[in-house]
Amino acid sequence: MPIQPAKLSDPAVRAFVTAVNSHDRERFLSLLAPDATMADDGSDRDLADWIDEEIFSSHGHMEVDKESHGGRSLVARYSNDTWGEMRTKWDFTVADDGRISRFETGEA
């Protein structure tokens, strides 16, 4: 049974998942620190290119199955038009101002 985004523990992560699932690029970008970074399968990627390709131009969607570390680590079924659905892990670093400074994802 997936965890509804509104029930996720960490406010920044909750807003991240909600923005992904509603395809709200403006809201998504507002959640990130100005110097935010990310990695996919252990390799740092260009944040702007990655979010465009993997989330917004390909209709990304997250169904969260499990959260840990105060809601800053997720296991989710992630799907998009490019790759279909896969089981993924997500780890978030949230800055003092409540914005996400880094996220890492990859196959779970």
Image: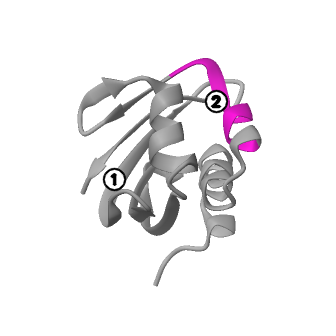
Query: Quick one: quadrant of the C terminus?
Result: bottom left
Dot 1 or dot 2, earlier in sequence: 2
* Above/below status of 10 relative to 48: below
Q: Residue at x 62, y 48 (%)?
A: 16
Relative vertical location of residue 49 with respect to residue 12 in this rendering, above or below: above
**Residue type for callout 1:** Lys
**Residue at 52% over, 53% down:** 71
Label 1: element kind: strand
Colouring: one colour
Work out whether residue 90 or residue 86 is closer to the camera in this orientation and state it.
Answer: 86
Mark carried by residue 10: none
**Amino acid on which the number 2 mark rests in the picture:** Leu
Residue lying at the far bottom in this picture: please name it: 1
Q: Is residue 51 left or right of residue 69?
A: right
Image height check: is 88 above or below 11?
below
Whole-percent x and y of residue 40? 32, 37
| Residue occupied by mark 2 | 32
What residue is pinned by disc 1?
Answer: 89
The part of the chain drawn in magenta is 27-36
Q: Position of residue 97 (x, y in %)?
A: 72, 25
